[in-house]
Image (tube, rainbow, N blue to C red):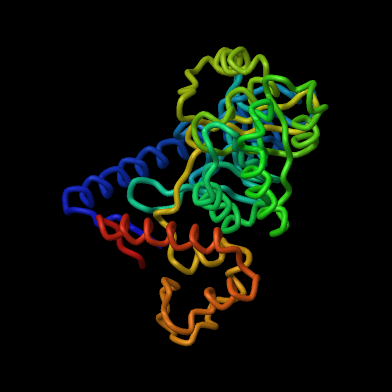
Amino acid sequence: MAKRRLSKQQQHRIRKIQEERATRAGKREKVIDAQREAGELGPEQQGLVIAHYGQQLDVEALEGEQAGQLFRCFVRANIDSLVTGDRVAWCAGQGSAGVIVARHDRHSLLQRPDNFGQLKPVAANIDHIVLVIAPEPEPHDSLIDRYLVAAENTGIPAVILLNKADLITDANRGSLNALLDRYRHLGYDVVTASARNPESHGNTITELVQDRTSVFVGQSGVGKSSIIQTLVPDRELKVGALSESTGKGTHTTTTAMLFHLDCGGDLIDSPGIREFGLWHMTAQELEYGFREIRDLTGLCRFRDCRHQGEPGCALDAAVEAGRISPERLRSFRRILQDMEEQQARGLKVT
């Protein structure tokens, strides 16, 4: 795990923040206990976290007469961090307020590193990550592989979506097919669509997200926003309605939010989710993120092999045997080198 070296001033600031949070949590607990004793909290019921705003969360009621309504909830201090997509047990309070009393088990968790290299949960119970690429900007192996490595290490299945298919020409068709075939050969699902001209590819995008909880990732310019706009045409209206329903602001640029899709299924979205890096990972996690490399770990002649052309490297032998494509090995080495350089500029692996 990579962590940024902290100065004494930064360490002091972190301790102060933690102490302040503990103080606020203690005050909230006293308020919650007082509400319980006064009979102001309703019975426990099931809910879904729709959005997260610091110490408060918007929860959708999933049962009873209030099903579908949103409540701005506090969280009991004994509950681990909650994120959008979590299923919880909660109690309704007065008006549109409530208290979360328990979190149900997650089947998946998407995490990103903060500025100090610590992994922070972003969204939960995701069924698949949709990696969006496009003919323009030209997709490159190393960029695609960075997202796939992150997906592999979370255990969440990844799907590659080639968007802007209307930009495929005779000039780029061959290279795009060769690129996508490499990932099909590795067992990744690859689909083609066009958010601007959806009728030309049937209901590809709709079928991809139907009855699933999805997250879209990819570099800037590949059309993620257009896809999301197609799936949630009134997204901004829904964001505004969410704010109005709770009487609070939404911080739309940073908050992960869950949207129910008309076709069935859910979409969790935020600009922070759409792009994430690998600098926090170890070399072993990078090896695991390449499907065809993970089984070769430990088979090199030398235990300290860095897979950069050393004698007896199992990866070079696998390329010669046709088990690894030369393009994927070059991508692996490029990413590994970038990680080492970034970690040398202020990160340490522990």
Q: Is residue 219 above or below residue 121?
A: above
Image point 45% across, 73% down: which residue? 307
Residue 141 location (% of width, % of height): 54, 50
Whether residue 29 is visible here, answered yes or no, is yes
Tell me which corner region of the image, top left, top right, bottom left or bottom right, holds residue 94. Answer: top right
**Residue 30 horizontal side relative to residue 162, left or right:** left
Where does residue 268 sit, x and y in percent of width and height? 62, 34
Q: The C terminus is located in which quarter? A: bottom left
Q: Which of the image's four quarters has the N terminus?
A: bottom left
83 to 251, vertically: above or below: below
Measuring 72% from the left and 45% from the top, which residue is drawn there? 190
Horizontal and vertical percent position of residue 176? 64, 42
Give the image location of residue 267, x and y in percent: 67, 32
Q: Nearer the viewer, residue 1 or 15?
A: 1
Q: Is residue 178 left or right of residue 221?
A: right
Quarter-wise, where is residue 280 in the image? bottom left
**In this view of the protein, can residue 79 be seen by the observer?**
no
Residue at far front of view: 170
